[in-house]
């Protein structure tokens, strides 16, 4: 284990916060950097060196990378479909974070660099049907990714590859498929379907509302990865000899309607579903083909959706109570 501090870029966010906690538990020194004011970080680990800085700037990236060993880049301006469909330029500006961090990593002679890519890099033509064929790594090309956010991810993946090939920087890249769990965004517009579903059902349960609105017709399909699998996968992929971007996602497929049904069952309520057909919907179907990760690691994310959603629901229920208990509906 390297004695040098580990940098987690985006440590105030959902996945970054969990990764920081895990690295500290494993005995690492951690520098956690995020643009958000500290009171907005989802988790703050006091044992880490916590820094508020904008990593779009080159100087801040050089300061963040000073004397570090490993770098995990989880910083991005992103969210669920409600955010990425309406903020394409902002999403693309995250290219500055990865660009400056790679340059700073190279100059600081960092030992290893991990980049968080996304299933949004995959060609849209392969995701037209709900009855989806799981996405293999080669399905990213020829390129037709999600507009804005997906193009930025694909470009940044590629830059990691060229820094490895041209400069010998040790880079590893995982394509996350929709990640959920406690200490994530659950309201405000950046939340993804699992957290949004919990919030909507909790709201119905607490206020006695008899309907919830689902974005889209509910027939669209996705797989969702629990945060513990994500953190385990990040560390394993960073330690591995997997040079090309690889899927890190669950292959347990559900319809979105099925996700709402599951959360209602967890909550012990039954409500009517209405469908908003003009809301941001994204692709019709998406699943992760885990052949490659199984081959390389003998492991793939396997936490069952029902188990992860129960933990997520319980956490969001607590947050909801803390924020809204006693307020009029
Ligand atoms: P998040 O929004 O909770 O965390 C990202 C963090 O980056 C935020 O705290 C944000 O403040 C920070 N950040 C944004 N711009 C910054 C800047 N200029 N300088 C410093 N910090 C900045 O999101 P997350 O779910 O934790 O995602 C982490 C990474 O994983 C991102 O790169 C994201 O694109 C990728 N990813 C996530 C998912 C998912 O389902 N959560 C899926 C695919 C890929
Ligand atoms: N966000 C959200 N909120 N989505 C909803 C809701 C709701 O209240 N109700 C239904 N949905 C539907 C969306 O319309 C979409 O079809 C599906 O649930 C999943 O939406 P998201 O969870 O927002 O995003 P995604 O799976 O399309 O894409 C996400 O995953 C990628 C990785 O797989 C995004 O978070 C990307 O940023 C991420 O890279």
Image (spheres, rainbow, N blue to C red):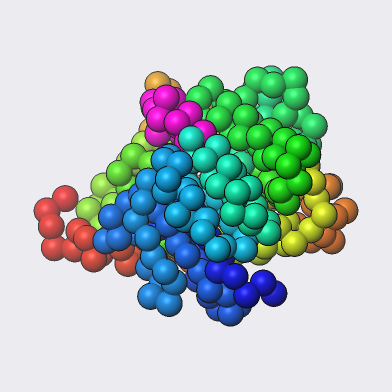
Q: Position of residue 32 (x, y in %)?
A: 45, 62
Residue positioned 76% across, 37% down in the render: 166
Residue positioned 48% across, 35% down in the render: 96
User: Magenta span has 149?
Assistant: no
Q: In the image shown, does 69 or 234 lie closer to the viewer?
A: 69
User: Magenta span has 92?
Assistant: yes
Does residue 132 sit above or below 172 in this rendering?
Answer: above
Does residue 25 sit above or below 13 in this rendering?
Answer: below
Asked if residue 162 shows in the view, the reply is yes
> Could you say which quadrant of the image residue 183 lies in?
bottom left
Q: Position of residue 182 (x, y in %)?
A: 45, 62
Q: In the image shown, does 230 or 19 lie closer to the viewer?
A: 19
Q: In the image shown, does 118 or 212 lie closer to the viewer?
A: 118
Circle count: 0
Asked if residue 301 shows in the view, the reply is no
Does residue 265 sit above or below 58 in this rendering?
Answer: below
Which residue reaches farthest right? 295
> Could you say which quadrant of the image residue 272 lies in?
top left
Q: Position of residue 299 (x, y in %)?
A: 79, 61
Residue positioned 63% across, 56% down in the render: 110
Q: Which quadrant: the N terminus?
A: bottom right
Give the residues in magenta.
Answer: 77-95
Q: Position of residue 284 (x, y in %)?
A: 60, 27
Q: In the image shown, does 159 or 205 lie closer to the viewer?
A: 159
Is 300 positioned to the left or the right of 283 in the image?
Answer: right
Which residue reaches farthest front? 107
Does residue 298 sit above or below 178 in this rendering?
Answer: below
């Amino acid at each position: 284990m390297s004695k040098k501090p580990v940098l987690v870029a985006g440590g105030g966010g959902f996945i970054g916060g969990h990764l920081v906690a895990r690295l500290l538990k494993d005995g690492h020194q951690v520098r956690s950097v995020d643009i958000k004011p500290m009171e907005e970080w989802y988790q703050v680990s006091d044992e880490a060196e916590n820094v508020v800085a904008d990593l779009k700037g080159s100087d801040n990236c050089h300061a963040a990378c000073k004397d570090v060993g490993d770098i995990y880049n989880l910083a991005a301006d992103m969210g669920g479909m409600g955010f990425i469909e309406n903020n394409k330029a902002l999403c693309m500006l995250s290219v500055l974070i990865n660009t400056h961090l790679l340059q700073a990593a190279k100059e600081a002679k960092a030992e290893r660099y991990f980049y968080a890519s996304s299933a949004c890099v995959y060609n849209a033509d392969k995701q037209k049907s709900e009855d989806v064929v799981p996405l293999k790594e080669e399905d990213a090309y020829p390129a037709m990714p999600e507009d804005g956010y997906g193009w930025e991810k694909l470009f940044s993946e590629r830059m990691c590859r060229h820094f490895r090939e041209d400069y010998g920087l040790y880079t590893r890249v995982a394509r996350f498929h929709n990640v959920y769990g406690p200490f994530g965004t659950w309201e405000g517009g950046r939340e993804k379907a699992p957290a949004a579903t919990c919030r909507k059902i909790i709201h119905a349960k607490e206020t006695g509302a008899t309907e919830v609105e689902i974005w889209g017709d509910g027939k669209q399909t996705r797989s969702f990865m629990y945060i513990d699998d994500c953190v385990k996968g990040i560390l394993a992929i960073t330690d591995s000899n997997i040079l090309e971007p690889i899927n890190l996602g669950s292959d347990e497929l559900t319809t979105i309607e099925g996700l709402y049904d599951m959360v209602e069952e967890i909550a012990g309520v039954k409500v009517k579903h209405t469908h908003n057909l003009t809301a941001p919907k994204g692709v019709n179907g998406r699943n992760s083909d885990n052949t490659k990760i199984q081959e390389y690691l003998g492991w793939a994310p396997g936490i069952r959706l029902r188990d992860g959603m129960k933990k997520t629901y319980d956490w969001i229920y607590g947050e909801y109570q803390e924020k809204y208990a006693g307020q009029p509906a």
